[in-house]
Image (cartoon, rainbow, N blue to C red):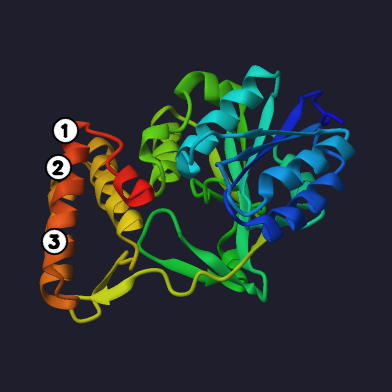
Amino acid sequence: MTDADGRRIVAVVVTYNRLTLLQRLLERLEAISEVDEVLVVDNASTDGTGDWLSGFEARSSRTSTTVKATNSGGAGGFHDGLEWAVGGGADLVWLMDDDGVPEPDCLARLLEHQDLDFWGPVVVDEKAPERLVFPIRLPGGTRTVRDMADVRAAATDGLIRDVVIPFNGVLVTRDLVERIGLPRAEFFIWGDDVEYLWRAKEAGARTATVVDAAVHHPSVGDLGTPMMFGRTTYNHSPSDLKHYCMARNNLVNLRRYNGWAYAFAFVAKTAWFYTFTKPRPGRLWLSARAMTAGLLGRWGGERRFIDG
């Protein structure tokens, strides 16, 4: 069905090697009547996802799938999925990874707010729903909230405006996509969601988090490793692939949207972290390679970690 304004709503799911999580998500989406179509982008999974999706697509009246020849990361998946949805006539696109599950009334609650361009739910811990998986930094200051009680207290008319957690159950309008384009596929993973949000805001998009709409998500633990005597944190990952993409993409985003001062501060923070907090000369070299690639616009360096 379409929404009250007659808009066609298409859900886009990007998946890679998480078949069990994907199965529970698609079961939920099948039960949400406001969704007209579900498009699944399989990033060349190797865990049987493709075969299972073929059978599921045959049984479903509104789910279509595409299997990529190679893994294009979350960035490539959302780029292709959003292009597919808009090209197929979607007026609203509901974007999500495979590891979250929206509450049954999540979309209905999002649709109660019609004066927005890019908006989404809170993302809560599936085992502790009063706790946020992705904390929200409140606009106009430095305060970050991590519990639903604080989120509700900070909301106005059920919204926290100018804040949204991208690609975790967010709605985006066709009009906004036509104005700002698609997510940057070359980012592969990490930072593509932030870049799309910052691009949307730069274009004047009306963004918000709807506090009574929720997606349940596995816990990701504490985000960021403390550094500089606990004064700040750094996004350290044991994965060279994730670190390469984070260092490259974060520097590109900061330079583009915040300026050189912020970009240089990130370089200094990275150097401090791998010199003093977690001394790793190899990581310093990897960071330098990634950041140089980003500054020079040399994309695809992440393939060495995937293809060996």
Residue designated by label 1: 296
Are the residues flagged by discs 1 and 2 in contact, CB closer than 8 Å? yes
In terms of image quadrants, where is residue 68? Answer: top right
Residue designated by label 3: 284
Question: In this view, which residue lies farthest toward the front?
Answer: 308
- Taking the spot 18% from the left edge, 63% from the top edge, the residue there is 283
Marks 1 and 3, the one that precedes in the sequence: 3
From the viewer's side, name the closer residue of 37 and 171: 37
Vertical order, 227 against 47 (above or below) = below
**Crowd band around label 2 with a 10 angstrom C-alpha radius: few (<14), some (14–19), many (20+):** some
From the viewer's side, name the closer residue of 86 and 261: 86
Across and down, in percent, residue 70 comes to 49, 37
Question: In this view, which residue lies farthest toward the bottom?
Answer: 229
Using residue 89 as the reference point, say whether residue 154 is left or right of it.
left
Residue designated by label 2: 292
Amino acid type, mark 3? Leu
Are the residues flagged by discs 3 and 2 in contact, CB closer than 8 Å? no
Amino acid type, mark 1? Leu
Vertical order, 75 against 18 (above or below) = above
Across and down, in percent, residue 205 comes to 50, 32
Mark 1 to mark 3 CA distance (whole Å): 18 Å
Mark 1, secondary structure of its residue:
helix
- Taking the spot 80% from the left edge, 25% from the top edge, the residue there is 5
Using residue 285 as the reference point, say whether residue 118 is left or right of it.
right
- Can residue 152 be seen by looking at this rendering? no
- Taking the spot 43% from the left edge, 35% from the top edge, the residue there is 201
From the viewer's side, name the closer residue of 182 and 230: 182
Using residue 49 as the reference point, say whether residue 189 is left or right of it.
left
Mark 3, secondary structure of its residue:
helix
Report how many numbered discs are placed on residues in the image.
Answer: 3
